[in-house]
Image (tube, rainbow, N blue to C red):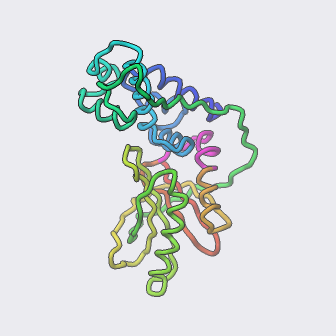
Amino acid sequence: MNIYKCLNKITEYIDNNLENNIEYEVLAKMMGVNSYTMQRIFSLITNIPLSEYIRKRRLSNAGFDLYNSNMKVIDVAIKYNYESATAFSRAFENFHGIKPSQVTKLSKLKNFPRIIFNENITITQELEYNIIKKEEFIFYALGIKTDNKKIGEDAPKFFIATELKYKEKYGDIKYGMVTYSDNLREKCNGYYVLYETKVNGFKKVIIPESKYLMFRINSQKAKDIQEMSHRFYLEFLPSCKYNLKNTPELEYYHDGVTDFLVPIY
């Protein structure tokens, strides 16, 4: 099935179940992948974590209910799966800018609409890949936390600044590492530069043995690496039979090329 048709089924299901407990495993089955893989695809395409999307859709509808009915705040909180009126009121105020108890016919409220995807996009280019197995890695990492929208801008800046600082003593940076998180913090994604030798101030990182999908990029430019990452998530992953492991992606910079390594089961 077209990835965008799958995503439309997912957002339709979410809208029909905002008052219920939404199981990510159910959404993942619509896409034919595991829960982690589905969340990564959704987040990369929409630039919003799935949990935040659901939260905003619920708060949008909660505002509508309070504006157009005589429902009590606690009843609306329970309707949209909040554990307490206090938690609901805090989330509502953060989203709408006013407390739910202050909603009147003169109030200005926000609406985060259901996302609807263009189903007519076609994929015509091929992607070449290898499956490789890597033994356990031990690296020394220094990184930054950023959000999904800014990681493409922040990561290359951090790489350049770090290599300038450490290159003379430790040589070129050969590896990069990308981590993702689906939570509501502003800065939940990470980019790290890795050295194989110990560096003062760097954190020791152990990456377990794994199989990887490897995509060779004939460039070390950030924009080309980011383009490959987007093509992987939008084109390759939805139509392949592999599921992602919840471990970091790696980038191996060597001989003027970059190997983009995605851990799989």
Q: Nearer the viewer, residue 188 or 261?
A: 188
Image coords of residue 90 (percent x, y): 29, 35
Q: Classify 155 as above or below 181.
A: below
Image coords of residue 261 (percent x, y): 54, 58
Q: Nearer the viewer, residue 256 or 79?
A: 79
Which residue is situated farthest in the bottom direction here? 168
Q: Taken as a whole, is the magenta stretch helix, strand or loop?
A: helix
Query: Which residues, given as a range, are shown in magenta?
Result: 231-244
Q: Classify 245 as above or below 57.
A: below
**Residue positioned 35% across, 38% down in the render:** 94
1 on left or right of 252: right
136 on left or right of 101: right
Image quadrant where one finds the N terminus: top right
Q: Nearer the viewer, residue 64 or 50?
A: 64
**Residue positioned 37% across, 19% down in the render:** 66
Q: Quadrant of residue 31?
A: top right
**Residue positioned 49% across, 46% down in the render:** 244
Q: How many marks?
A: 0
Q: Classify 220 as above or below 103.
A: below
Which residue is situated farthest in the front direction here? 106
Image coords of residue 147 (percent x, y): 45, 52
Image coords of residue 241 (percent x, y): 57, 41
Q: Quadrant of residue 225?
A: bottom right
Quick check: is 232 in the magenta stretch? yes
Which residue is situated farthest in the right direction here? 124
Quick check: is 221 in the magenta stretch? no
